[in-house]
Amino acid sequence: MSSKTTVPIELLRKYDRPGPRYTSYPTAPIWSEEIGADAYADALKTVSSEAEAPLSLYCHIPFCRKRCYYCGCTTCIVTKESTVDNYVDALCCEIEKTSALLKPRRGVSQLHFGGGTPTSVGINRLQLILDTLERSFAFVSDCERSMEIDPRITTTEQLDFLAERGFNRISLGVQDFDADVQTAIGRIQPYKQVASILEHCRHLDFKGINFDLIYGLPLQTVKSFGKTLDRVIAMHPDRLAVYSFAYLPSVKAHQGKINPSDLPTTDVKYQLFGSAIEKLTGAGYRQIGMDHFALPDDELSLALDDGRLYRNFMGYSIQSAPDMIGFGMSSIGYVDNGFFQNISRLKEYSRRVADGSFAVYRGMKLSNDDLIRQYLITSLMCNFRLSWAQLEKRFAISYADYFADEHSRLRDFFDDGLLKETVDGLEVTPVGRAFVRNIAMTFDAYLTDDSRGKKATYSRTI
Ligand code: SF4
């Protein structure tokens, strides 16, 4: 059963600090540029022998029509149609080359399109990519096919096309319904536009419909964001992701269009986050990880109960495949217990693929210690608990011996009521869910390793 969770502002003040989001462990800034295309090809060949194991696929479509001022994604603003055509050609080429190395492994249980704005390339190009994927892989009958959509530019014809091509999950970028906030972030998206797209998604029977919201945006107040949350709750999406806005104009120059004096103070930002948790849990949503919420009958909530939740670069999902293949510029894959990321420059990506190579520019092969900590951090981040017995059985270690130092550093979390010891392990309390990044950081070997950790810059945990 869900019940309202109130997070004390003093705790938000105490624990707010820079830290990883743990969409991967070890985190991307630790990866090495010595891992490239050859290592990736070797990893693909190694896992090809597991012919029956399913795959998870991710396609990155980086294009948008106009850049929103708050955007933190890897995007390109479309200026020439030929640029998009060249990219789609490179993407199809990468799909075919990958599938050839993975043979005979072909089964796919998950497909996700992210961006950018995937539908901005239009139905014909999406069709070309999907035809290539279907020629190259074999999609299992209950494959989860999902896409991120921008309600401002996605048409009902495009949604019909996606449903025909087997897409069954949709995520809508909403951010905030307040008109002044929308002007301040350069993204005008009236409530009616979102409501009409949502209605069509429901008509097409998409499941797990998700809204992305952002707190900490310019001109947001607790009152205005409360109104947005009330409207969202009335629309009853199956899932919500409520992200913190990271204002980094030195890294993302377009964020310079945001007037810094319009940004909420740190204390208001804490209140925005606290009110989101309180309103959404009060309305019956269950908190999934630190910043996701789902209705009790959504499959994410059911997976939380069964300990099957998983977190990767696409957010929370149900793990259905041991290896994930990333296609497209900046995409990330996880193959043979190693991370591989493609280059984030459009021309360079297309050139490398056209030259017959992969476009991987960095990665990391995980050590046994990395795998132990990855398991532990994933377990806390996704399922809010850790079973010592399961960890010990899986890796043939003793938790008490292996993590003696880390465990002694959990004291504050126990004392503040964020974490508790159970008969067989650790459990994050409902209030502690907002601080699960901080708890996970205790077990991150690279945050205390100055020789490697100092390369990293992370957003704040709240
Ligand atoms: S639509 Fe999304 S990806 Fe594109 S610029 Fe706006 S925030 Fe960034």
Image (spheres, grey):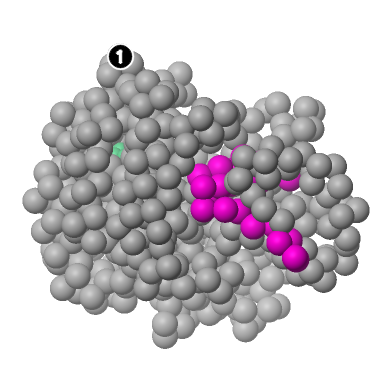
| Count of marks placed on residues | 1
Residue 94: give x, y in percent of width and height: 50, 59
Q: Nearer the viewer, residue 316 or 384?
A: 384
Q: Nearer the viewer, residue 38 or 245?
A: 245
Residue at the far top: name it.
Answer: 261
Q: Is residue 429 magenta?
A: yes
Note whether residue 134 is visible. Answer: yes
Whether residue 203 sits left or right of residue 401 in the image: it is: left
Residue 189: give x, y in percent of width and height: 15, 42
Is 198 above or below relative to 133? above
Note whether residue 78 is visible. Answer: no
Please state, as top left, top right, bottom left or bottom right, where the N terminus lies in the image.
bottom left
Residue 210: give x, y in percent of width and height: 32, 59
Is 61 above or below relative to 306? above
Whether residue 141 sits left or right of residue 400 in the image: it is: left
Q: Residue at (69%, 37%) from the top-left corner?
A: 412
The local crowd at label 1, few if under 14, some if 14 to 19, many if 20 or more residues have their Cα within 10 Å, is few
The quarter holding residue 17 reads top right
Q: Give the amino acid at mark 1.
A: Ser
Question: In the rendered structure, which segment of residues is drawn in magenta?
Answer: 422-443
Which of the four quarters of the rendered structure image does ligand 1 lie in? top left
Secondary structure category for the residue under label 1: helix
Q: Residue at (31%, 49%) from the top-left corner?
A: 279
Residue placed under numbered mark 1 in the picture: 261
Q: Residue at (22%, 34%) from the top-left corner?
A: 223
Whether residue 300 sits left or right of residue 285 in the image: it is: right
Q: Is residue 411 magenta?
A: no
Residue 191: give x, y in percent of width and height: 12, 47
Q: Residue at (87%, 55%) from the top-left corner?
A: 400
Q: Nearer the viewer, residue 48 or 420?
A: 420
